[in-house]
Amino acid sequence: MKITRRRYLFCSVAGFLIAVSKPSRLMAQNVNKITEQAELLTEKGHELLNQGKYLEALEAWKEATKIYRQLHLDEGIAGNLINQNLALQGLGLYLNACDLLLSALKIDTWSYFPTLNAPDKSSKKALYTAIYQVKPTPVNLLGLQNLGDILRLLGKLGESEIVLKETLSMAQKMTLNADISSVLLSLGDTKQSMYERSSVEYRWIGELLFQKDTVTEIHQNALISLEYYQQVNNTTNAPIAIKLQAQLHSLTLLLDFDKWLKKELLSGNSRLTTTKTNIHRQIQPLIDLIIKNSSLFNELPVSQSAYAKLNFADSLNKTSNKQLQSLAINYAKSALQTAESINNQLLQSFCWGTLGKLNPDESHVCFKQALLFAQSIRASDIVYEWQQQLADLYSQQGKSKEASYFYEAAINSLIQVRANLLGSNPDTQFFFYEKVEPIYRNYIRLLAADPSPNLEKIIQVNAHLQLEQLKNFLQCGRLNLIPLNNLQELPSTTAIIHIIDLDSTIEVIVQSPDHSLHHNSVDAKLIRNHVNNLLDIVQSLKFYSNNQSEIILHSQRLYDLLIKPLKIYFHSSGTLVFALDTSFQSLPMDLLHDGKEFLTQQYSFAQTVGYKIQPLNSLSRNQPTALIAGLSKKSPSFNDENAPKGLKPLPGVVIEVAEIKTQITNSKVLLDEKFTSLQFHKEISKDDFPIIHVSTHGQFSSNAEKTVFLAYDKVINILDFNNFIKSQAQSNENPIELLVLSACQTAKGNKRSALGMAGVAAQAGAQSIISSLWLVDESSTAILMQEFYKALKNGLTKAEALRQAKLSLSSNPKYVHPYFWSGFVLVGGWL
């Protein structure tokens, strides 16, 4: 089990409480009873914090701060503001804690912005400037260390490392060995957080190039973190509490890193063999050392001691040694006795939850107790975890009703947790894939396993999952989307097809034009290779040279398994709207082949993410206006670090832009040097453009920062685009009805292309987006786009206009290969 943020916090504050109190004691020797009262309040706050009574501790420290303000004792004020920060951290109010620390340090020239982006040069400079203005006193160094810690909890790992390194440098100059050891511990924790983020990123980012870079980051971050922990243990005067924490955190990292290295070696990465050997041989000696010195646990402050025991128990349980796993239960029980003795309900919840994971025979009772304690203090950030554990238990026991109840409860708790974290912590993006998605998936598996599955409920839960995934990608709390079921008077030839990947099975649910639901479940083993092989083909640089027979082999097999059994429930022509799961999003569905022809001969296609779209309206065809932007030549943006690699100029864009302008005469064109990010922003802001057509290099990624398209001067990523569109929304009432990105591509290995496309459309408030999944031939693209806009002008729906354009292009012997026409996908409204 990953240590939660709260537990990690209280495993990391040893030495802080004593150090903050020191200035108070020193002053108390020389001042009157008012100052002694402030010191008593300060110590009372520490006692309350140790009992988990964060609000009461906060109030005590606020009172102490008032007294020091009356006495104009700056050191006492700063010390108690730092204390208040600890209480706020305990309450999960990280932003407030950060603001308080900045106030304590009198930093007003630098502010925090929640984003996963590494700090750029200007923000680094501002941060260094702010640090250098802080007077290097012991209490200020403590404040800086706490600032580094809270920035870590806020997900600002680069900034955390900068602050802590500068704090270490100041402390070394003052030769404060104890302080140096605690700062080294904090640096080790920040590097461990970097390792954890990189590890999660490696698992959920599909792009092969990014994965290769991330392997290097994982390796480096782990080794540097372990080096910091070793420095703590090598520091002669380091407090016992600091050394024990360094050993516990080091053990946590060693076990996780060893597991990751094992997987990498099995995948063929033999370069890590030596590292794997060195890491593995450190684990048992460190466990033996901690057990040998187990009496040191009791020398920690009481609450801190219990959290440290839970940390150790969790690590012992990750070994394959049955004796050590049994010992883990003893440490957890000892921690529980401590929690009960101080009546710390949050700690008791953690203890019961840990015991539930350590002891399967009693897990049901333990998780129930953990849940009761968490609910009693409204700790929703851990409530969901025990609800999920109970749901999984009931599911394994075949108790579907009880399992459904707890899955629903866990999802509701998670919605609250993510809403609270979304604006302050960018790590919710990783939290989603690690914690949120598995709960939804397990719930859908439970529903699908029923002999008479509730298809409507499966669609609803999956739709919620996909929508949450999109919001997570965009890091936003709300999207103006409506369920397809809410659409009125859909054409009678429209069928909606849901494809849900549950690892062992692929569930296909068809909603017929009469709204009836029909289900087909397929063994995933029969499908997986065909999906992966077809994805490899379409994402290959030599796709155009692949023999069509090989493409048809895989696409026909997918059709036979997924679509053919349900084809009787929809018309032989019309529109097929696909709500696709991740593993299918980078495959164009009109590549499906029924043995006689590609389905695009019979149907027009559209995709949705999460079974939800922008409110539908037919495109205005009475002389619509368009903003047409294009980049045909090499420009400064080609060198941007987030631009796709190996880009070449697109001279055919000039022809494409000219052809589109002949079809939409009422248009504004930005070409090459005129297509700057600033000018693009200005045009969107000042005019109503129902159609925006951008012909330039671009990339769809599972990483929002790398979902970009190129203007002349720089790349515009999805978050930048959001800022542009907000300006447009403020000045214009009409939404963007159609957004076309015609020279984009899906990053190699990515399976979440529709997520990137739908993300761009959602940020733009666009009803529909048409884009290419791979970089298509320029001349054929110009022809397809001309035919598309001509069909739109003739009154066809967007989906049918795109189909007719594809058919027209593929009728040309030069462009009959699917490479030229199948990569264009319509996501969103199809009317």
Image (spheres, rainbow, N blue to C red):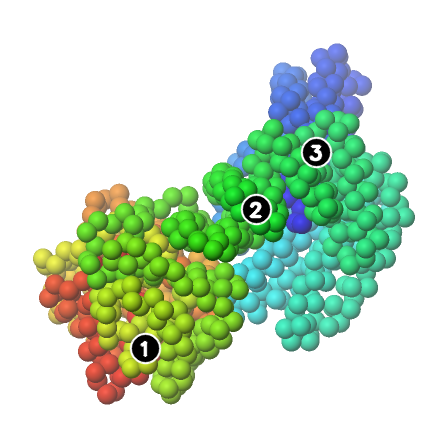
The residue at 47%/62% (across/down) is 501
Q: Which amino acid lies under the numbered mark 3 shown in the image of this protein?
A: Gln
**From the viewer's perspective, is residue 793 above or below residue 465?**
below
Looking at this rendering, what residue extends furthest in the front direction? 451
Q: Secondary structure at mark 2?
A: loop
Q: Which residue is mark 3?
A: 348
Name the spot of residue 163 as percent of width and height, x first: 63, 46
Q: Secondary structure at mark 1?
A: loop
Name the spot of residue 715 as percent of width and height, x first: 38, 62
User: Is residue 413 rendered to the left or right of residue 492?
Assistant: right
Q: Which amino acid lies under the numbered mark 1 shown in the image of this protein?
A: Asp
Q: Residues within 10 Å of mark 2 (few under 14, many from 20)?
A: some
Q: Nearer the viewer, residue 73 or 514?
A: 514
The residue at 27%/47% (across/down) is 486
Confirm or deny contact between disc 1 and disc 3 (CB under 8 A).
no
**From the viewer's perspective, is residue 403 above or below residue 75?**
below
Q: Which residue is mark 1?
A: 594
For discs 3 and 2, the disc positioned in front in the rendered view: 2
Q: Which residue is mark 2?
A: 399
The answer to whether any part of residue 625 appears in the image is yes
